[in-house]
Amino acid sequence: MATKQRPSTAIGKTADYLDQRTTIGALVKEFARKVFPDHWSFMLGEIALFSFVVLILSGFFLTMFFDPSMGLVHYEGQYPDTLHGELMSSAFASTVHMSFEVRGGLLMRQIHHWAALIFVASIVVHMFRVFFTGAFRKPREINWIVGLTMLILALAAGFTGYSLPDDVLSGNGLRIIDGVVLAVPVIGTELSNLVFGGAFPGDQIIPRLFTIHILVVPALLLGLIALHLFLMVLQKHTQYPGGGRTDKNVVGYPALPVYVAKMTGNFFIIFGVLALMGATMAINNVWNYGPYDPAPVSAGTQPDWYILFVDGALRLMPGPGWEWVIAGYTLPMNILIPAMIVPGILFTLLIAYPFIEARLTGDHREHHVLDRPRNRPVRTGIGVALFVAFLVLALAATNDLIATHFALSIFAITWVLRILLIVGPVFAFFVTKRVCLALQRKDRELVLHGHESGRVVRFATGEYVEVHTPLDAQEVWLRTQHTSPQPLEIQPAQDSHGVKRKGYRSDRRWQRISEFFYEDRVEPATPAEVAAAHSHGKHDELEARTPAAVGPGGAGSRAGSSAGGGGGTGTAGPRAAGPGATEPGSAGQGEDKQQ
Ligand code: HEM
């Protein structure tokens, strides 16, 4: 009888001890064997994950020294001496104290701040990756929504943290938020009093934000990250298209040891880069701005990058004529539109996007192979248009800096950016869509006619033809495995008895949107087309031969026959080759290389 092998190493013994008490071994084994596809873009989610870990670790340190109180104190620290003895809130004083008097305090503050910026940046880039590749399609719609909720929470975490030091910059940020809260119709004033515990700024907001920042938001994020990753493992990760990859399999490496090793390495790299940034790149030196005082607001003050779009939208929105008074209530549309209505619509559409797309294609199948962005031109166009709108709004949030640095009129800049905000995304959409369609045509061309080799062969008749190299099976698969969705087909408006069909108008509306998405399309080459393209044309015969054979006495051997399609070269088929040779196959003729 085989005896059970006993572990001999300390780790083995510990694992055995745990397994005997929890039977966790089976679960670990199952996970360790799980196959994950490989692609660099899958690291974007990991960057978000690991910068979140750095945020928790560095944030834990900061809570030890930060005093979330708006009570006033005289600053007692020696550094910087300009602040010595000045009246300020305990929150601000403790931030400065932490920066100058606590060992490693400034480093930790800076690591924390950089990690926050990278955290949100990686979430946004990760979201774009998921969007452009269609990773949100069934069955991952729930994870898309979980992700968007985390994005909103990440913005909340960033903003609440940014406000804590109670310096001039963050105080003015809060003042803007107060303005937005006050703009809420009917209940704005009460809501502002509720949020700030009385008139702005009051003495409540910093402690409240502190609780939200260190408890509520991180707890929610932690729970949602766990759910996000659980769903990812449960549904399996998507894979990029390639030979042998289908919606029914996963091609990749096992979690253990490959991914565990990769992820551990990735974690240390991210940790190291953030530590380096924190150690060498100054950020949010609040003592230069001073404690919050409602009076000083200077030009050149910007929020962190992820809030720029709201600030920019507020700056671009025209004021006069947009404050409507209805039944004695003021509706400040100049604030509501940029700060609430537009972001509200944007996030609602983003949340709804997977469902909208499924409705437009009528495709409710599961998708585990990702789309190449070029194969979904309208979706890709929408993503790029969104990105351009974000850039224009971010620029708008720096209109004062552009004005002072380039000695330009701030009004002119604002007008140019207003026009750009409307024209830019539309232009970006159409250019992107055309580029995607052109890339799809190129894919077709490649599959049907092969790569241009740069080798031009001359035949006895003096005719030239370029040799094309056929694609290998992997390349062909990559370019032909997708389907090209068609616009929705709907039932006619009336049935066979001429009775109007209920729901026709709604169906027709969806059909129109679907036409907008899928009317312009390039069908992938079918196997029949590939076979046809490779069964005619003399250049195809050239393909079949080795380069050496396409030379003297090679390519020309069949030349002289009728013109073939010539495929992608657009030329007639080779006939006879060059100097000194009237008959194909003669020595000394044939190949001219023209690069
Ligand atoms: C705290 C923020 C986030 C963290 C820590 C995070 C983490 C991750 C990780 C580690 C993965 C697997 C690797 C990868 O595909 O990149 C992943 C996958 C995924 N994430 Fe996120 N994510 C976050 C936010 C988001 C957002 C904002 C969205 C979309 C709105 C999103 C949607 C998805 C989807 C749909 C998948 C599955 C992708 C696939 O299988 O191809 N995530 N996430």
Image: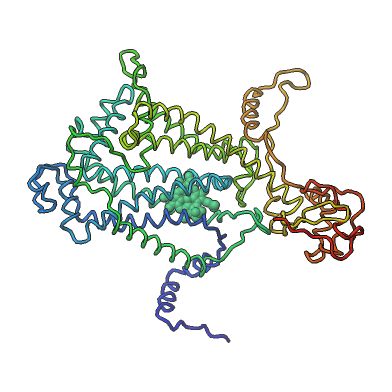
Image coords of residue 550 (percent x, y)? 81, 62
Image coords of residue 197 (percent x, y)? 21, 34
Question: What is the basis of the colouring in this image?
Answer: rainbow
Classify 540 as above or below 417: below
Image coords of residue 320 (percent x, y)? 34, 18
Q: Nearer the viewer, residue 290 or 551?
A: 551
Q: Nearer the viewer, residue 197 or 378?
A: 378
Classify 350 as above or below 259: above
Q: Nearer the viewer, residue 402 or 370?
A: 402
Q: Residue at x 62, y 52 (%)?
A: 369
Asked whether residue 231 appears in the rendered view, the answer is no
Image coords of residue 572 (percent x, y)? 84, 47
How many marks the image carries: the answer is 0
- Quadrant containing the N terminus is bottom right
- Quadrant containing the C terminus is bottom right
Query: In the visual, does 162 lie left or right of 125?
Result: left
Query: In the visual, does 176 lie left or right of 532?
Result: left
Classify 348 as above or below 579: above
Residue 319 sits in quarter: top left
Q: Which residue sits furthest top?
A: 327
Residue 304 sits in quarter: top left
Asked whether residue 226 appears in the rendered view, the answer is yes
Q: Residue at x 46, y 63 (%)?
A: 263
Query: In the visual, does 248 lie left or right of 457?
Result: left
Q: Residue at x 36, y 49 (%)?
A: 117
Query: In the visual, does 575 lie left or right of 193?
Result: right
Residue 64 sits in quarter: bottom left
